[in-house]
Image: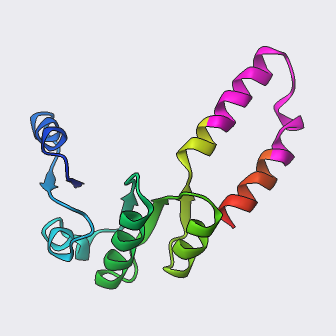
Amino acid sequence: MVIESEYALFSDLQRDGLRGVWGDATSTDILHAAGIERARVLLATMPDRASVLLTAERARAACPELAVVARVHGAPHASQLGLLGVEAMVQPEFEGGVEMVRRALARLDIDESAAAPLVDDARRRIYG
């Protein structure tokens, strides 16, 4: 089930045979229309931190056992999400950068294990 606020993208989802609700995921009415009470996992992928926080908060209020994977916007945002019980966070820009470095190192025949401690440390600083 997808909640999409942009109508053109929502139309594309429907055309591709995916189930969805058109609306704002920060709305409790939209979350309920999407069946949040029966959900096992929520992916909060919105590009702005306020929407991610509000969606996570309202979804967990409706379904306390819900696992939430959220897009995070740096360490302070990760702390806020952690307080809401969000257990998995991803910062796309950081993860994209890690993949770019990984590929560059591979191209230079440098073993990934050399960069792994640096990446692990950076992830701890971002995600907590």
Q: Is residue 12 above or below residue 32?
A: above
Q: Is residue 105 above or below residue 16?
A: above
Q: Residue at x 77, y 46 (%)?
A: 119
Left or right: 122 in relation to 5:
right
Q: Name the quadrant of the N terminus.
A: bottom left
Q: Name the quadrant of the C terminus.
A: bottom right
Does the stretch in magenta take in 104? yes
Left or right: 123 in relation to 65:
right
Scheme by which the image is coloured: rainbow
Does the stretch in magenta take in 7? no
Left or right: 123 in relation to 117:
left
Res. 121 image quadrant: bottom right
Q: What residue span does the magenta drawing correspond to?
A: 97-118
Left or right: 43 in relation to 16:
right
**Nearer to us in this view, 58 or 110:** 58
Q: Residue at x 73, y 29 (%)?
A: 102
Q: Residue at x 53, y 58 (%)?
A: 72
From the image, give the main secondary structure of the stretch colored magenta: helix
Res. 93 image quadrant: top right
Residue 43 position, x and y percent, is 39, 58
Residue 126 position, x and y percent, is 68, 59
Q: Residue at x 18, y 69 (%)?
A: 35
Q: Is residue 101 above or below residue 18?
A: above
In the rendered picture of this protein, how many numbered marks are placed on residues? 0
Residue 71 position, x and y percent, is 48, 56
Residue 101 position, x and y percent, is 73, 29
